[in-house]
Image (cartoon, helix red, strand yellow):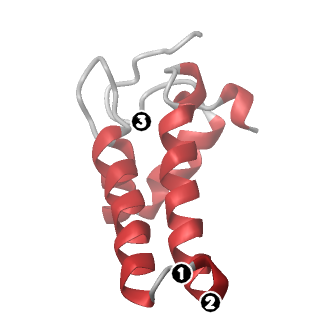
Amino acid sequence: MLNKSVVKQSGQLWKLGIAFAALIFGSIAPLFESWGISMTAGTVIAVAGYIFGTLLISCSACGSRWFWEATKDAGWYSPLFKDSKCPACQHEFKH
């Protein structure tokens, strides 16, 4: 599924990985007391990961912030993972 995605084809899969990891870590870490992450710190980490992804994963051709647009219109999520074209400008990415 991700092999044909515009996120991977545009070379930004690493950004998605960081955003996802921060979101998951920040959500789960406070549940394990031995990790020393408070609920507040976990929330900050998770929100930072979300903001990182929504603001920095974008089209190099038109500048559209794909995940920001997807937060406003859920119909954007599917093309981001199934197509190699920018949903905004239709620029074709071939990695």
Which label was assigned to residue 10?
A: none
Asked if disc 1 and disc 2 are in contact, CB closer than 8 Å, the reply is yes
Q: Which of the marked residues, 2 or 3, is nearer the chain's N terminus?
A: 2
Q: How far apart are marks 1 and 2 (CA)?
A: 6 Å
Q: Distance between the residues labelled 2 and 3?
A: 42 Å
Give the residue at x 57% y 24%: 84
- Mark whose residue sits in front, 2 or 3: 2
In the rendered image of this protein, does residue 51 appear above or below residue 2?
Answer: below
Using residue 4 as the reference point, say whether residue 21 is left or right of it: left
Which residue matches tag 3? Answer: 87
Which residue matches tag 2? Answer: 33
Percent across and percent down for residue 38 are 45, 86
Report crowding for label 3: few under 14, some 14 to 19, many 20 or more residues within 10 A (C-alpha): many
Which residue matches tag 1? Answer: 36
Percent across and percent down for residue 44 are 34, 73
- Mark whose residue sits in front, 3 or 1: 1
Quadrant hosting residue 57: top left
Image quadrant for the C terminus?
top right
Query: The disc labelled 1 sits on which kind of residue?
Result: Gly
Using residue 65 as the reference point, say whether residue 17 is left or right of it: right
